[in-house]
């Protein structure tokens, strides 16, 4: 049994794409928290935000964090807001290596421009401002995570290689 690998970071930093590659390379199960929440509720994340509100979604994220941090051998892509509750990072750190992916607002914009499934950026004509504002509010929470990867000029494969290197540097098997 080995420690989980948990990828955190703002929307569009490449958590899911890199996580999938890392899981394949390590022959582990990949878990996308948003996808699990959508499967279990039968709703899209944007529908949960619209119908029940953000606080309800954060509660679902919190419960899923407790569940996943009680398991091992997983590669987990979190939602961008997982850092909002410090208990989530504390729980994940007990059984895993938490790595924060970073990207600049203009790079994030390019990566999320065509998406319509991110409620916190939807309906905002000035998307770059929405990204900058939200990022500024959360920056210190992301910065508090010791292991970081700058994904600005990275493909998902580049990021996955760095995740593996960081993880292997942190773990003794
Ligand atoms: C959120 C990020 C999204 C999703 C939800 C809220 C956030 O996940 O969990 O829309 O608060 O940053 P991604 O980071 O996978 O886009």
Image (tube, rainbow, N blue to C red):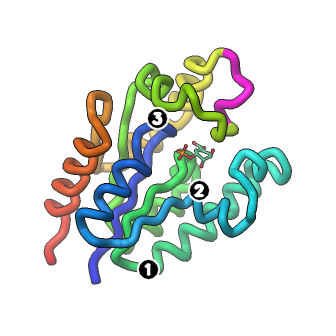
Spatial distance from mark 2 to mark 3, Cα to Cα? Answer: 21 Å
Secondary structure mostly seen in magenta is: loop
Q: Quadrant of ligand 1?
A: top right
Is residue 117 toward the left or the right of residue 106 in the image? right
User: In the image, which disc is placed on residue 139?
Assistant: 3
Circle 3: element type: helix
Under tag 1, what secondary structure? loop
Query: In this figure, which residue is indicated by the disc labeled 2?
Result: 34
Q: Which mark is residue 6?
A: none
The residue beneath circle 1 is 71
**Along the line of sight, which residue is nearer the eye, 138 or 45?**
45
Q: In the visual, does 18 lie left or right of 70? A: left
Cα gap from disc 3 to disc 1, whole angstroms: 28 Å
Is the C-beta separation of discs 2 and 3 under 8 Å?
no
Q: Which is more N-terminal, label 3 or label 2?
A: 2
Q: Is residue 106 magenta?
A: no
Q: Residue 155, located in which quarter of the rendered image?
A: top left
Q: Which residue is depicted at the point 27% across and 28% down?
A: 153
Pick the residue in front: 77 or 171: 77
> Which range of residues does the magenta coloring cover?
120-125
Question: Residue at image x 52%, y 37%?
Answer: 138
- 10 Å neighbourhood of mark 3: few (<14), some, or many (≥20)? some
Q: Measuring from the top left, give residue 32's x and y in whole percent.
A: 50, 60
Query: x and y percent of residue 90 in the render?
Result: 45, 64
């Amino acid at each position: 049994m080995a420690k989980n690998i948990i990828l955190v970071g703002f929307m569009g930093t490449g958590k899911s794409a890199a996580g999938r590659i890392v899981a394949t390379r390590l022959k582990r199960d990949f878990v996308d928290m948003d996808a699990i929440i959508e499967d279990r509720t039968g709703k899209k994340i944007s529908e949960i935000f619209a119908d029940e509100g953000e606080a309800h979604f954060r509660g679902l994220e919190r419960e899923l964090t407790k569940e996943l941090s009680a398991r091992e051998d997983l590669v987990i892509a979190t939602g961008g807001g997982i850092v909002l509750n410090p208990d989530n990072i504390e729980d994940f750190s007990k059984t895993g290596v938490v790595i924060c992916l970073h990207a600049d607002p203009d790079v994030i914009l390019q990566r999320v421009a065509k998406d319509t499934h991110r409620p916190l950026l939807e309906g905002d004509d000035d998307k770059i401002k929405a990204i900058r504002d939200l990022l500024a509010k959360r920056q210190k929470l992301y910065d508090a995570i010791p292991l970081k990867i700058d994904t600005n000029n990275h493909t998902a494969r580049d990021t996955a290689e760095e995740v593996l290197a960081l993880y292997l540097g942190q773990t003794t098997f």
